[in-house]
Image (spheres, rainbow, N blue to C red):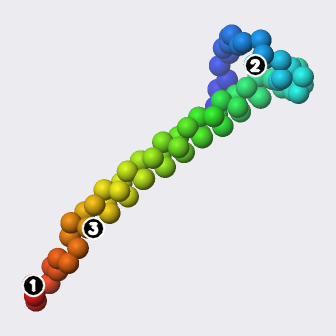
Amino acid sequence: MEDTKIMEIQAEDLFEEPVKEVQPRKRSRFIAESVKESLARKNARQLAEEYEAAAAEIRKIGCELDGVSGDGLD
């Protein structure tokens, strides 16, 4: 993956903790990893919501078909 330089503007209180906790030459990597983790969590939440919606639809269809037999022997 190719690196791209960006300029970010941060609220001062958001910047203070990484300055204290992360070595000066490691901050860009820290920010990139934080963004990746945040996006991964967001995607996981979205996927879970979509699965839950699909499961609800499957349960609804299952209830509608409850007692229906497709073998023609009834």
Rendering coords of residue 40 (x, y %)? 59, 40
Identify the image quadrant of residue 61: bottom left
Q: Quadrant of the C terminus?
A: bottom left
Is residue 25 at least partly visible in the picture?
A: no
Reading the chain from its start, which is encountered first: label 3 or label 1?
Answer: 3
Q: Identify the residue at horizontal 71%, vertical 33% (top origin).
A: 33
Q: Are marks 3 and 1 in contact (CB under 8 Å)?
A: no
User: Which numbered circle lies on residue 72?
Assistant: 1
Rendering coords of residue 48 (x, y %)? 49, 49
Q: Nearer the viewer, residue 39 or 68?
A: 68
| Three-letter amino acid code of the residue under disc 2 | Leu
| Three-letter amino acid code of the residue under disc 3 | Gly
Left or right: where 65 falls relative to 16: left
Left or right: where 34 falls relative to 19: left
Q: Identify the residue at horizontal 86%, vertical 20% (top origin).
A: 19
Q: Identify the residue at horizontal 38%, vertical 58% (top origin).
A: 55
User: Which numbered circle lies on residue 62?
Assistant: 3
